[in-house]
Image (tube, rainbow, N blue to C red):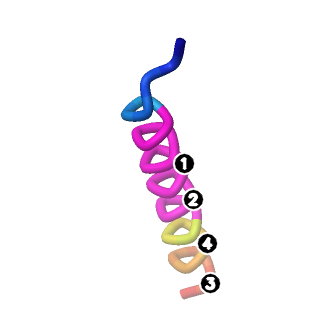
């Protein structure tokens, strides 16, 4: 069984990766 905390951590990691990608895109535009 997968703990609920694992699901929350996965969401946090995904959001963090998306945030970094957006920063890279913004940096390229600037």
Query: Residue at coordinates 44% horizontally, 54% vertically from top-left?
Result: 16
The disc, 2 or 4, on the residue closer to the chain's N-terminal end is 2
Whole-number angstrom distance, CA of label 2 to CA of label 4: 11 Å
Residue at which label 2 appears: 18
Whole-number angstrom distance, CA of label 1 to CA of label 2: 6 Å
The disc, 4 or 1, on the residue closer to the chain's N-terminal end is 1
Query: Which is closer to the viewer, label 2 or label 4?
Result: 2
Query: Which is closer to the viewer, label 4 or label 1?
Result: 1
Query: Which is closer to the viewer, label 1 or label 2?
Result: 1
Query: Which is closer to the viewer, label 3 or label 2?
Result: 2
Residue 19 on image: x %, y %? 49, 64
Q: Is residue 18 above or below residue 13?
A: below
Whole-number angstrom distance, CA of label 4 to CA of label 1: 17 Å
Query: Residue at coordinates 56% horizontally, 79% vertically from top-left?
Result: 26
11 within the magenta span: yes
> Is 25 left, or right, of 6 in this rendering?
right
Residue 27 on image: x %, y %? 51, 76
Query: Residue at coordinates 43% horizontally, 43% vertically from top-left?
Result: 8
Whole-number angstrom distance, CA of label 3 to CA of label 4: 6 Å
The disc at residue 26 is none
Q: Tag 2: Cα neighbours inside 10 Å, few (<14), some, or many (≥20)?
A: few
27 within the magenta span: no
Which range is magenta?
7-21
Residue at which label 3 appears: 29
Instruction: Answer whether labels 4 and 1 touch (C-beta < 8 Å).
Output: no
The disc at residue 25 is 4
> Is 6 left, or right, of 1 in this rendering?
left
Instruction: Answer whether labels 1 and 2 touch (C-beta < 8 Å).
Output: yes
Whole-number angstrom distance, CA of label 3 to CA of label 2: 17 Å
Instruction: Answer whether labels 3 and 4 touch (C-beta < 8 Å).
Output: yes
Question: Which secondary structure, mark 1?
Answer: helix
Q: Tag 4: Cα neighbours inside 10 Å, few (<14), some, or many (≥20)?
A: few
């Amino acid at each position: 069984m997968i703990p609920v905390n694992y699901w929350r951590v996965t969401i946090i990691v995904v959001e963090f990766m998306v945030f970094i990608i957006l920063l890279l895109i913004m940096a390229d535009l600037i």
